[in-house]
Amino acid sequence: MRAVRIHEFGGIDKLVYEENVPEPTVGMGEVKVRVRACALNHLDIWVRNGIPAYKTPLPHILGSDIAGEVVEVGEGVRTVSVGDAVVLYPVISCGKCRYCKTGRENLCQTVQVIGAHRAGGYAEYIVVPARNVLPKPTNLSFEEAAAFPLVFLTAWHMLMTKAQLQPGEWVLIMGGSSGVGSAAIQIAKMRGALVIATAGSEAKLERCRALGADFTVNHTEPEWHKQVREITEGEGVDVVFEHIGQAVFDACVRLLAKGGRLVTCGATTGAEATFDIRYVFSRELAIHGTYIGTRAELEHILPHITAGKLRPIVDSVFDLSEARAAHEKLESRDFFGKMVLRVS
């Protein structure tokens, strides 16, 4: 089969397009999916560069966000049929540990993320447990369908499950032009919140407003946080949605109003941040780390996608053989929404 693999960790040049990669075989309780599209995430860059804790086997196929068609079902599978158009829940869990038994499989003791711990979607075929297969929304193309699972699941888990965002609350969406940021803007507006989104250019800010952001702020300006404070008439925000990390973390903590909640899922500008602990206890703030989300949450999102209330934003589509160019664009940050590899 055709696939893009890395044989060693490193830069974009480590992505190798190959046409004779062995196809994966189907086992008990598994299904084989013909990948039609696979969206990129910053996780792909981190895994490509090498994350020692992940123990990613080499050679490795990246790609966590996958849409395609079922072409083979293993013994014991009753919930999926050949020909079904599907999207994949990106987390594979043991189903036996205390986290799995309480519906928190994203915290599974032996958690595997597709495209990180095991082979992903930069390939013509992928094999996954049948439980990881969900129906593709009929109103989306394969490219659009590949662009929503990971980012909308992560954003939903952050805003709805962890932050418990309420109608009428102020929410600050950092990096609103990213895949997860554009998903968060839509979820927050659907919830009835007042949304302030940040981005790095006027063109991106305009698109954030088109998605529903009530106010926008350019986070490249030195005094960006003062603009947020002015928008809220000095009170600050109830929720901060954060995935940028070191460069903005302290300012985000300071911008929280009393009883505020910060949710974070990434650290693209650096992993170490300092902040004044006194803000946390004197204002009764909460800081939540988040890791993807649960299958149940993804099922809850699907009807909103099908109804058109939430929609994935595709910036550009590349052929599988153009994976290096797609990674170059992802690293450039010159995009809005998601990059997608077409594998058909």
Image: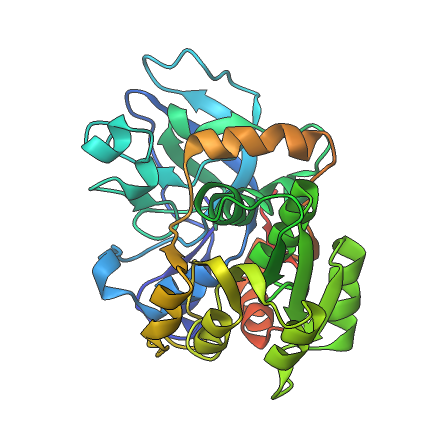
Q: Is residue 285 left or right of residue 67?
A: left
As drawn, the residue found furthest toward the front would be 282
Q: Position of residue 251 (x, y in %)?
A: 50, 77
Figure disc tally: 0
Q: Position of residue 190 (x, y in %)?
A: 69, 42
Q: Is residue 166 above or below residue 299?
A: below
Q: Position of residue 127 (x, y in %)?
A: 38, 34
Question: Quadrant where the N terminus lies?
Answer: top left
Q: Is residue 263 left or right of residue 193?
A: left
Q: Quadrant of residue 204?
A: bottom right
Taking depth in this image into account, of 72 and 285 the one nearest to the observer is 285
Residue at image location 50% in from the left, 71% down from the top: 252
Q: How is the image coloured?
A: rainbow
As drawn, the residue found furthest toward the bottom would be 222
Q: Is residue 61 visible?
A: yes
Residue at image location 28% in from the left, 20% down from the top: 28
Q: Is residue 143 left or right of residue 7?
A: right
Q: Is residue 136 above or below residue 281?
A: above
Q: Position of residue 271 (x, y in %)?
A: 35, 73
Q: Quadrant of residue 83?
A: top right
Q: Quadrant of residue 329?
A: bottom right
Residue at image location 53% in from the left, 71% down from the top: 255
Taking depth in this image into account, of 296 and 141 the one nearest to the observer is 296
Q: Is residue 331 above or below residue 340?
A: below
Question: Quadrant where the C terminus lies?
Answer: top right
Taking depth in this image into account, of 51 and 301 the one nearest to the observer is 301
Residue at image location 20% in from the left, 42% down from the top: 109
Q: Is residue 123 visible?
A: no
Q: Is residue 119 left or right of residue 84?
A: left
